[in-house]
Amino acid sequence: MKRLLPTLLGLCCIADASAQLKVQSVLPHGAAPEKTAPAVYDSTANIRTGGDAAYYESLVGQRILFYPRDIHADLRPVAYFNFLAETPAVVRVDTTWLRKPRRKVRPEDFRIDTLYSDTYRPRFYKDETTAACGCTTMESHVLGRDLFPTAPETGWFTPAEAIERKTFEITGLKSHRIQGEAFRVFRLRSEEGETLYWYAHAGKDKTNLRDEYYPVVVEGLIEKYRAAYVGREFFLTKRKPEAPGYVSGYFGLQAKTMQGEENRLNFGTELKCLDLRLIGDGTGYAVPAFVFERKEDSVRIYIPLCRYPTPFGVEGYTLGSD
């Protein structure tokens, strides 16, 4: 009993000391780092090509509007071939005769063939001009089309009106290579809830201005500019001599009136922003543009928010011998 008492007292002391010790976990060497917060989309800029993985991840959840063609533009392509549906659709049911039809038809005389197309909202075209939306001519070739994109084609393609002037939500992005050519694949959801895939240009050259756009605008960008500019008054200031693109102090800003006439806004011109709308110049797409009223004479002019992209692609397509 005398020996047991000191033992019990020692155990109590150890238990009391252990209750005061802090619990610490030591990660083994090479453990996975903590997850970083996802990148936040910069809603003051439109979608660009050549971004890193984090930049494209920030686009998920954004809604994009594909530019409509100007109603006065004589654009030949009527359909696209680089939009694919998540689920192939039945486009035709054919009867294939295995022998010459006879008066009393038997089941072994024919076969029913169901034809599918993985094209988004497929429509059959015969000898029509199709194109890739937001791709180069070389990328069009890799996707299985001729290097002469305006050559008449026959097959199942996506009608231009199923894409242009439509809004889609970006639900995912990935890179994909076909025959060594890199593509940026956008997974989109239509307003009707359909899932489709847009195979687009994956640019790398940040100094090449033709790689700086897709034929789309982020809806959030339009709304942000609309809230910041519409209804406010501005005046045109001179550009500093050391600023990039400076010419001289004698020139202002070239613009067009709402009637399409060339107009120059001199330095010091006072303007009021009236609207932000889709405006075309009669040759290609209609793009988001500011509508200003010049206070001195109430003339209304427009200034595009972005460059006019050449029709249907990053490089543009020759639509005639001229």
Image (cartoon, rainbow, N blue to C red):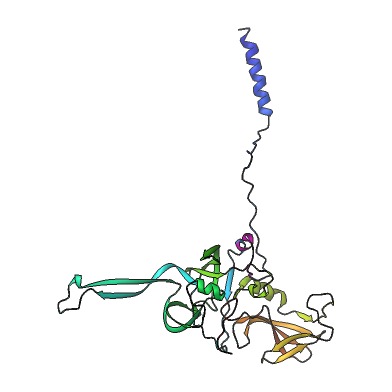
Is 137 in front, or is 235? 137
In the image, is residue 49 part of the stretch drawn in magenta? yes
Q: Is residue 271 magenta?
A: no
Picture coordinates of residue 294 (x, y %)?
76, 87
Pick the front one: 135 or 288: 135
Q: How many marks?
A: 0
Looking at the rendering, in which quadrant would you find the C terminus? bottom right
Q: Nearer the viewer, residue 75 or 273?
A: 75
Magenta residues (range): 47-56
The quadrant where residue 114 appears: bottom left
Residue at the image point whose x is 65% and y is 12% from the top: 6
Does 134 sit left or right of 249 as displayed? left
Q: Residue furthest left?
A: 104
Q: Is residue 123 left or right of residue 135?
A: left
Location of the N terminus by quadrant is: top right
Which residue is at the front of the view, 134 or 303? 134
Outermost residue, top direction?
A: 2
Is the residue 299 above or below the residue 10 in the image? below
Q: In the image, residue 73 lies at what x, y percent?
A: 57, 88
Tell me where residue 277 appears, x and y as whole percent.
64, 81
Residue beneath the point at 63% across and 13% down: 7
User: Please, is residue 41 above or below residue 239 in the view?
Assistant: above
Give the quadrant of residue 289: bottom right
Q: Position of residue 262 (x, y in %)?
A: 71, 91
- Write the residue at 39% across / 71% down: 89
Give the main secondary structure of the magenta stretch.
Answer: loop
